[in-house]
Amino acid sequence: MCTNGYGAPGFYGLGPSLKDPAFPANGMFATVDTGWQLDGSPLDVVVDSDTSAKLGVDVFRPAQPLQPGDVLDYWGDSCTPSCSYCPSDCEDYHATIAAPDLVAPTMPELTVHTLLVRDPEGAGGWSCGDSDNLEITISVSDDIVPTSELGLVAYIAPTANEVAQLTTPSTLLGCDYSSDARDGVATATVALGESVGRVRIGDSPFVSEEPICFALAAFDRAGNVGERSFVSCVDTDDPDDPSVIWVASQGCGCQAGAGGGLGSALLVAAVAVVLRRAGRRS
Protein backbone atom coordinates (compact mmCIF):
# COMPACT_ATOMS: atom_id res chain seq x y z
CA MET A 1 0.00 0.00 0.00
CA CYS A 2 2.85 2.40 0.74
CA THR A 3 4.66 1.99 -2.57
CA ASN A 4 1.61 2.16 -4.68
CA GLY A 5 1.63 4.25 -7.86
CA TYR A 6 1.55 7.82 -9.11
CA GLY A 7 -0.94 10.16 -7.48
CA ALA A 8 -3.02 7.58 -5.57
CA PRO A 9 -1.22 7.04 -2.28
CA GLY A 10 -2.40 4.76 0.44
CA PHE A 11 -4.80 2.33 -1.20
CA TYR A 12 -3.23 0.71 -4.23
CA GLY A 13 -2.89 -2.93 -3.15
CA LEU A 14 -5.48 -2.79 -0.36
CA GLY A 15 -6.98 -6.27 -0.21
CA PRO A 16 -5.20 -9.49 -1.16
CA SER A 17 -2.47 -9.62 -3.75
CA LEU A 18 -3.27 -11.84 -6.74
CA LYS A 19 -1.27 -14.72 -5.28
CA ASP A 20 -1.59 -14.10 -1.56
CA PRO A 21 -0.62 -16.97 0.78
CA ALA A 22 -1.72 -15.25 3.98
CA PHE A 23 -4.32 -12.49 3.78
CA PRO A 24 -5.64 -11.79 7.30
CA ALA A 25 -9.18 -12.87 8.06
CA ASN A 26 -9.93 -9.31 9.22
CA GLY A 27 -8.31 -7.72 6.15
CA MET A 28 -9.79 -4.66 4.41
CA PHE A 29 -10.89 -4.01 0.84
CA ALA A 30 -10.86 -0.71 -1.04
CA THR A 31 -14.09 -1.02 -3.05
CA VAL A 32 -17.43 -2.84 -3.08
CA ASP A 33 -16.49 -4.59 -6.33
CA THR A 34 -13.49 -6.47 -5.01
CA GLY A 35 -13.08 -8.88 -7.95
CA TRP A 36 -12.76 -11.76 -5.47
CA GLN A 37 -15.06 -14.77 -5.13
CA LEU A 38 -15.66 -17.21 -2.28
CA ASP A 39 -17.10 -20.62 -3.16
CA GLY A 40 -17.98 -19.38 -6.65
CA SER A 41 -19.93 -16.29 -5.52
CA PRO A 42 -18.73 -12.66 -5.52
CA LEU A 43 -17.41 -11.62 -2.13
CA ASP A 44 -20.02 -9.45 -0.40
CA VAL A 45 -18.45 -6.55 1.49
CA VAL A 46 -19.85 -3.67 3.56
CA VAL A 47 -18.44 -0.40 4.85
CA ASP A 48 -16.53 -0.63 8.12
CA SER A 49 -17.61 2.68 9.66
CA ASP A 50 -15.19 2.64 12.60
CA THR A 51 -12.08 1.94 10.53
CA SER A 52 -13.23 4.34 7.81
CA ALA A 53 -13.40 7.10 10.41
CA LYS A 54 -9.86 6.35 11.57
CA LEU A 55 -8.49 6.49 8.02
CA GLY A 56 -10.64 9.31 6.69
CA VAL A 57 -11.89 7.25 3.71
CA ASP A 58 -14.33 4.38 3.22
CA VAL A 59 -12.93 0.87 3.59
CA PHE A 60 -14.84 -2.41 3.36
CA ARG A 61 -14.89 -5.80 5.05
CA PRO A 62 -16.71 -9.04 4.16
CA ALA A 63 -20.35 -9.08 5.25
CA GLN A 64 -19.74 -12.62 6.54
CA PRO A 65 -16.40 -12.91 8.36
CA LEU A 66 -13.72 -14.88 6.56
CA GLN A 67 -12.21 -17.88 8.31
CA PRO A 68 -8.59 -19.06 8.33
CA GLY A 69 -8.21 -21.61 5.56
CA ASP A 70 -10.81 -20.03 3.26
CA VAL A 71 -9.59 -19.57 -0.31
CA LEU A 72 -10.63 -16.59 -2.42
CA ASP A 73 -10.51 -16.82 -6.21
CA TYR A 74 -9.94 -13.70 -8.27
CA TRP A 75 -12.35 -13.08 -11.13
CA GLY A 76 -12.22 -9.44 -12.17
CA ASP A 77 -13.29 -8.01 -15.52
CA SER A 78 -9.87 -8.77 -17.00
CA CYS A 79 -10.25 -12.49 -16.31
CA THR A 80 -12.77 -13.31 -19.05
CA PRO A 81 -11.11 -15.64 -21.59
CA SER A 82 -10.60 -14.21 -25.06
CA CYS A 83 -12.24 -17.24 -26.70
CA SER A 84 -14.48 -20.18 -25.74
CA TYR A 85 -11.59 -22.63 -25.50
CA CYS A 86 -9.00 -20.20 -24.08
CA PRO A 87 -7.95 -20.48 -20.43
CA SER A 88 -8.52 -17.55 -18.12
CA ASP A 89 -5.53 -15.39 -17.25
CA CYS A 90 -6.67 -15.55 -13.63
CA GLU A 91 -6.76 -19.30 -13.00
CA ASP A 92 -3.75 -19.09 -10.69
CA TYR A 93 -4.95 -16.04 -8.78
CA HIS A 94 -5.93 -17.18 -5.30
CA ALA A 95 -5.74 -15.77 -1.77
CA THR A 96 -5.56 -18.03 1.25
CA ILE A 97 -7.04 -16.56 4.43
CA ALA A 98 -4.82 -16.54 7.51
CA ALA A 99 -5.51 -15.77 11.16
CA PRO A 100 -6.69 -12.24 12.01
CA ASP A 101 -3.99 -9.57 12.33
CA LEU A 102 -4.49 -7.78 15.65
CA VAL A 103 -1.14 -5.99 16.06
CA ALA A 104 -0.66 -2.41 14.81
CA PRO A 105 2.52 -1.16 13.11
CA THR A 106 5.15 0.65 15.15
CA MET A 107 5.25 4.41 15.71
CA PRO A 108 6.97 6.02 12.69
CA GLU A 109 10.22 7.91 13.16
CA LEU A 110 10.53 10.79 10.70
CA THR A 111 13.42 12.66 9.10
CA VAL A 112 12.15 15.70 7.20
CA HIS A 113 13.98 17.78 4.58
CA THR A 114 12.78 20.60 2.35
CA LEU A 115 14.65 20.25 -0.95
CA LEU A 116 15.00 23.69 -2.56
CA VAL A 117 16.56 23.99 -6.02
CA ARG A 118 19.43 26.44 -6.27
CA ASP A 119 19.42 28.45 -9.53
CA PRO A 120 16.30 26.68 -10.82
CA GLU A 121 15.25 26.27 -14.44
CA GLY A 122 11.87 27.63 -15.49
CA ALA A 123 9.32 25.90 -17.66
CA GLY A 124 9.89 25.96 -21.44
CA GLY A 125 7.76 25.27 -24.46
CA TRP A 126 8.49 21.54 -24.39
CA SER A 127 9.54 21.02 -20.78
CA CYS A 128 8.54 21.73 -17.20
CA GLY A 129 10.52 23.68 -14.66
CA ASP A 130 12.29 22.53 -11.54
CA SER A 131 10.16 21.62 -8.53
CA ASP A 132 10.89 22.05 -4.84
CA ASN A 133 10.07 18.96 -2.77
CA LEU A 134 9.38 17.94 0.78
CA GLU A 135 11.21 14.67 1.49
CA ILE A 136 10.01 12.59 4.43
CA THR A 137 12.03 9.53 5.43
CA ILE A 138 9.92 7.14 7.49
CA SER A 139 11.23 4.37 9.73
CA VAL A 140 8.35 2.02 10.59
CA SER A 141 7.73 -1.72 10.75
CA ASP A 142 5.02 -4.32 11.30
CA ASP A 143 4.93 -7.78 12.83
CA ILE A 144 3.65 -9.45 9.64
CA VAL A 145 4.06 -7.41 6.44
CA PRO A 146 6.98 -5.38 5.08
CA THR A 147 6.97 -1.60 5.27
CA SER A 148 6.08 -1.41 1.57
CA GLU A 149 2.69 -2.98 2.36
CA LEU A 150 1.77 -0.51 5.10
CA GLY A 151 -0.41 2.55 4.55
CA LEU A 152 0.27 5.99 5.99
CA VAL A 153 -2.09 8.68 7.23
CA ALA A 154 -1.01 12.26 7.91
CA TYR A 155 -2.39 14.76 10.42
CA ILE A 156 -1.55 18.30 9.27
CA ALA A 157 -2.24 21.70 10.86
CA PRO A 158 -0.55 25.11 11.28
CA THR A 159 0.76 24.32 14.78
CA ALA A 160 1.81 21.28 16.80
CA ASN A 161 -1.00 21.88 19.31
CA GLU A 162 -3.56 21.86 16.51
CA VAL A 163 -2.11 18.62 15.12
CA ALA A 164 -2.58 17.02 18.53
CA GLN A 165 -6.27 17.98 18.46
CA LEU A 166 -6.98 16.28 15.13
CA THR A 167 -8.97 13.05 15.35
CA THR A 168 -9.37 12.45 11.59
CA PRO A 169 -6.42 12.28 9.17
CA SER A 170 -5.86 15.19 6.79
CA THR A 171 -4.75 12.90 3.98
CA LEU A 172 -3.30 9.56 3.00
CA LEU A 173 0.36 9.46 2.04
CA GLY A 174 2.16 7.26 -0.47
CA CYS A 175 5.81 6.26 -0.63
CA ASP A 176 8.27 6.75 -3.47
CA TYR A 177 8.67 4.08 -6.13
CA SER A 178 12.44 4.21 -5.57
CA SER A 179 11.90 3.45 -1.90
CA ASP A 180 12.07 -0.33 -1.65
CA ALA A 181 11.24 -0.13 2.06
CA ARG A 182 13.89 -2.64 3.05
CA ASP A 183 14.99 -2.55 6.68
CA GLY A 184 11.77 -0.79 7.63
CA VAL A 185 12.60 2.54 5.94
CA ALA A 186 10.56 4.27 3.23
CA THR A 187 10.58 7.74 1.68
CA ALA A 188 7.70 9.99 0.63
CA THR A 189 8.47 12.94 -1.65
CA VAL A 190 5.81 15.65 -1.78
CA ALA A 191 5.97 18.03 -4.76
CA LEU A 192 5.64 21.55 -3.38
CA GLY A 193 5.48 23.54 -6.62
CA GLU A 194 7.73 25.33 -9.09
CA SER A 195 11.15 26.32 -7.81
CA VAL A 196 11.17 29.56 -9.80
CA GLY A 197 9.40 32.03 -7.53
CA ARG A 198 8.99 29.29 -4.88
CA VAL A 199 5.41 28.73 -6.01
CA ARG A 200 3.35 26.83 -3.45
CA ILE A 201 0.15 25.89 -5.24
CA GLY A 202 -1.62 22.55 -4.99
CA ASP A 203 -4.46 20.59 -3.40
CA SER A 204 -2.25 18.74 -0.97
CA PRO A 205 -2.43 19.95 2.65
CA PHE A 206 1.37 19.62 2.70
CA VAL A 207 1.61 22.46 0.17
CA SER A 208 1.45 25.83 1.92
CA GLU A 209 3.06 29.24 1.86
CA GLU A 210 2.75 29.24 5.64
CA PRO A 211 4.48 26.98 8.20
CA ILE A 212 2.86 23.61 8.74
CA CYS A 213 3.16 20.88 11.35
CA PHE A 214 2.35 17.20 10.83
CA ALA A 215 2.49 13.73 12.30
CA LEU A 216 2.20 10.37 10.54
CA ALA A 217 0.72 7.04 11.59
CA ALA A 218 0.99 3.69 9.81
CA PHE A 219 -1.82 1.20 9.24
CA ASP A 220 -1.77 -2.40 8.03
CA ARG A 221 -4.05 -4.45 5.76
CA ALA A 222 -6.31 -5.26 8.71
CA GLY A 223 -6.87 -1.59 9.55
CA ASN A 224 -4.77 -1.57 12.70
CA VAL A 225 -3.56 2.04 13.08
CA GLY A 226 -0.33 2.54 14.98
CA GLU A 227 0.75 5.34 17.28
CA ARG A 228 1.40 8.73 15.70
CA SER A 229 4.92 9.96 15.14
CA PHE A 230 6.29 12.96 16.96
CA VAL A 231 5.18 16.19 15.30
CA SER A 232 7.47 17.80 12.71
CA CYS A 233 7.12 21.48 11.76
CA VAL A 234 8.51 23.08 8.60
CA ASP A 235 8.23 26.26 6.58
CA THR A 236 8.87 25.13 3.02
CA ASP A 237 8.71 28.73 1.78
CA ASP A 238 11.57 29.90 4.01
CA PRO A 239 15.09 29.29 2.61
CA ASP A 240 16.46 29.62 6.15
CA ASP A 241 14.22 26.94 7.63
CA PRO A 242 16.29 24.29 9.49
CA SER A 243 14.83 21.57 7.25
CA VAL A 244 16.19 23.08 4.02
CA ILE A 245 18.75 21.27 1.87
CA TRP A 246 19.85 22.98 -1.35
CA VAL A 247 19.94 20.77 -4.44
CA ALA A 248 21.10 21.32 -8.02
CA SER A 249 18.73 22.01 -10.89
CA GLN A 250 17.46 18.94 -12.71
CA GLY A 251 17.30 20.85 -16.01
CA CYS A 252 13.54 20.68 -16.60
CA GLY A 253 13.39 16.95 -16.00
CA CYS A 254 9.66 16.95 -15.21
CA GLN A 255 10.37 15.11 -11.99
CA ALA A 256 7.52 16.60 -9.99
CA GLY A 257 4.46 14.58 -9.08
CA ALA A 258 0.82 15.34 -9.65
CA GLY A 259 -1.46 16.34 -6.83
CA GLY A 260 -4.79 15.17 -5.47
CA GLY A 261 -7.09 15.66 -2.53
CA LEU A 262 -8.27 13.12 0.02
CA GLY A 263 -11.02 10.98 -1.48
CA SER A 264 -10.52 12.10 -5.07
CA ALA A 265 -9.51 8.83 -6.79
CA LEU A 266 -8.36 5.52 -5.57
CA LEU A 267 -8.78 4.65 -5.90
CA VAL A 268 -8.43 7.44 -3.48
CA ALA A 269 -5.94 10.03 -4.68
CA ALA A 270 -4.90 11.91 -1.62
CA VAL A 271 -1.82 14.05 -1.76
CA ALA A 272 0.58 15.54 -4.27
CA VAL A 273 3.27 12.90 -4.08
CA VAL A 274 5.95 11.77 -6.47
CA LEU A 275 5.74 7.99 -6.38
CA ARG A 276 8.46 5.74 -7.56
CA ARG A 277 8.87 2.05 -6.72
CA ALA A 278 11.44 -0.61 -7.36
CA GLY A 279 8.82 -3.27 -8.16
CA ARG A 280 5.16 -4.18 -7.89
CA ARG A 281 4.06 -7.08 -5.76
CA SER A 282 2.02 -9.75 -7.46
Image: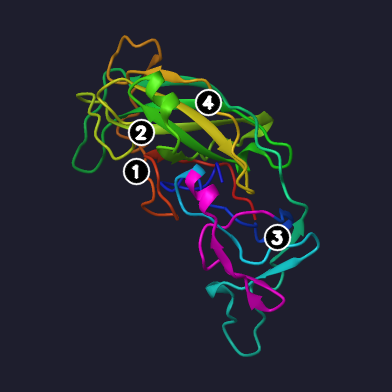
Residue 94 x %, y %: 71, 66
With respect to residue 279, does 212 lie above or below?
Answer: above
Cα separation between marks 1 and 4: 20 Å
Q: In this view, does 96 lie above or below 268?
A: below
Q: How crowded is mark 1: few (under 14 residues within 10 Å), some or many (20 or more)?
A: many
Task: Name the spot of residue 55 as percent of width and height, x first.
Answer: 49, 44
**Tag on residue 137?**
4
Residue drawn 66% across the image and 67% down it = 64
Residue 3, x across and y down, in percent: 54, 43
In this view, the residue in front, 87 or 77, is 77
Crowding at mark 2 (Cα within 10 Å: few <14, some 14-19, many 20+)? many
Image: magenta residue range: 26-53
Q: Which of marks 2 and 3 is nearer the N terminus?
A: 3
Q: Do the residues labelled 1 and 2 touch (CB within 8 Å)?
A: yes
Residue visible at 73% across and 37% down? Answer: 143
User: Above or below — where is 19 with respect to 202?
Assistant: below
Specify whether residue 250 is painted magenta: no
Q: Which of marks 3 and 1 is nearer the N terminus?
A: 3
Q: Is mark 1 on a helix, strand or loop?
A: loop
Counting residues from the start of the chain, the first of labels 3 and 4 encountered is 3
Q: Is mark 2 on a helix, strand or loop?
A: strand
Number of the label disc, if any, that sits on residue 191: 2
Question: Who is closer to the viewer here, 71 or 161?
Answer: 161
Residue 81 placed where, x, y %? Answer: 60, 81
- Give the residue pinned by disc 3: 19
Residue at the disc numbered 1 = 258
Name the residue located 64 percent from the left edge and 73 percent from the top edge. Answer: 89
Mark 4: secondary structure: strand
Q: In which quarter of the image is residue 234?
A: top left
Could you give the CA–CA distance between mark 2 and mark 3, rounded to whole angstroms? 34 Å
